[in-house]
Image: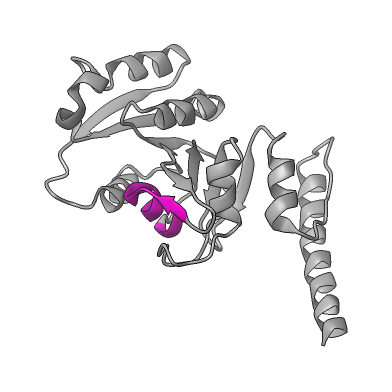
Amino acid sequence: MIEEQNSQLESIEARHRAVFEDIVRRYGISRSEWRSLSHWSSEVAVNAYYADLVVISRPERTGQMSDPPGLAESLVLSSGRPIILFPPRGTASRVRRILIGWNATREAIRAVADAVPLLARADAVEVLIVDHQRQRARHGQEPGAEIARRLAALGARVEVQPLSSGGQDLGHLLLSQAVAFRADLLVMGAYGHSTLREWLFGGVTRTALYQAGLPVLMSR
């Protein structure tokens, strides 16, 4: 059984490596490296520490707190790097339209800073602010104005969209607005913490982490 499992793993790795090498050739990537890791939970995290950006498939799970932690959860909470999570079986495309979930927190500020290279090249950027009345001191007199000016100075075409949740779930509201805006990418801060046995995420982060139908850039 062990030999059969190892054979299956080698076959899977060979297929993935062939895809990787085909992409490298197709796009003329001058520097690349394939690494096969035996213990992903620790080795992937160590490699992520030194990356500018980590791209990974988002988990296909319900996101209950009782679920065991996975690769995505570990990297989002502990790597300190921006993570782009792709929906399962999703396909990459040019990032033309970007939605920012903005609440003026440290995590959101970090996410926008990490996404600047993409934001500067986007055709359209929408800064979504939900229920800013609850955090007036954080947002200032004109919610979203400063972040919009900052991004516009980089060349981005930015609009600020203030919304009231009206009692709706904030995570689902964020994802539905991404669909309405026809966003290619959602940029948001990741909120949560880890304990010895649990990975505890805020509600909005959990919804995006497990249910988003578009790529999501998360930073913490």
- Residue 69 picture location, percent across and down: 54, 60
Q: Residue at x 46, y 27 (%)?
A: 112
As displayed, is residue 185 above or below residue 127?
below
The number of numbered badges drawn on the structure is 0
Judge whether residue 97 is colored magenta: no
Q: Residue at x 50, y 40 (%)?
A: 217
Q: Is residue 11 visible?
A: yes
- Residue 186 picture location, percent across and down: 42, 41
As displayed, is residue 44 above or below residue 131?
below
In the displayed structure image, the side of residue 141 where residue 5 appears, left or right: right
Q: 157 or 151: which is nearer to us?
A: 151
Q: Residue at x 53, y 65 (%)?
A: 68
Q: How is the image coloured?
A: one colour
Judge whether residue 203 is colored magenta: yes
Using the rendered view, name the quadrant where residue 104 is placed: top left
Q: Residue furthest front?
A: 196
Q: Main secondary structure of the magenta part?
A: helix
Region of the chain picked out in magenta, as a range? 199-211
Q: Is residue 84 visible?
A: no
Q: Quadrant of the N terminus?
A: bottom right
Q: Residue furthest left?
A: 166
Q: Residue at x 42, y 18 (%)?
A: 151
- Residue 7 picture location, percent across and down: 86, 78
Q: 151 or 59: which is nearer to us?
A: 59
- Residue 93 picture location, percent across and down: 56, 46
In the displayed structure image, the side of residue 17 where residue 200 appears, left or right: left
